[in-house]
Amino acid sequence: MIKRKLVLSFPENIVTKPITYKLVKEFNLEFNILRAEITPNMEGKMLIELRGDKAQIDQAIEYLTDTGVSVQEAAKDIIIDKNQCVDCGICTSLCITQALTLDHKSFKLKFNKDECILCELCLDCCPVSAIKVHI
Ligand code: SF4
Ligand code: SF4
């Protein structure tokens, strides 16, 4: 048995379909939904941990991809380099879970790791490259 953490992106036309249910039923996998969000443009994002036989996980990923779901290996961590960050707030507008916010009083960037779904949407927006991913 192996474990894999994946980020699934569901386009609007399939966001309501019971696709993850099939992972259990047809591929005999266990999965935990660690985070799930619907973005403003109605795309679904889900961070899941799959457990099961390697071959069946590979088949399940193939099934998801064929169905139109984008599957990415989840990063292990998002890191904000506080020495580089200039608290401009650009990243907060891209963070769908509000893991990144600006403190109303200090105007400093706050990062709540517990809310981060490792979607990596914030990665390329930082003008000083203060946002890094640990894979
Ligand atoms: S990866 Fe970035 S944009 Fe995505 S949830 Fe985490 S902090 Fe927010
Ligand atoms: S975009 Fe970069 S510099 Fe601006 S608040 Fe976010 S991490 Fe800091």
Image: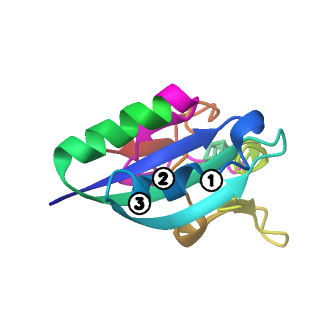
Q: Which of 41 and 81 is in front in this view?
A: 41
- Distance from the alpha carbon under mark 3 to that under mark 2: 5 Å
Name the residue type under label 2: Lys
Residue 15 in the image, given as x and y percentages of width and height: 71, 45
Horizontal side of residue 107 vs 20, given as left or right: right
Secondary structure under tag 2 reads helix
Dots 3, 2 in contact, CB < 8 A: yes
Name the residue type under label 1: Pro
Q: Mark 2 points at which residue?
A: 22
Horizontal side of residue 30 vs 88, given as left or right: left
Graded by Cα atoms within 10 Å as few (under 14), some (14 to 19) or many (20 or more), the crowding at tag 1 reads few
The question of residue 1 being in magenta is answered with no
What stretch of residues is rendered in magenta?
66-87
| Numbered label attached to residue 66 | none
Instruction: Say whether residue 82 is visible.
Output: no
The question of residue 80 being in magenta is answered with yes
Instruction: Say whether residue 83 is visible.
Output: yes
Q: Determine the image quadrant of residue 60.
A: top left
Dots 1, 2 in contact, CB < 8 A: yes
Q: Name the residue under label 1.
A: 18
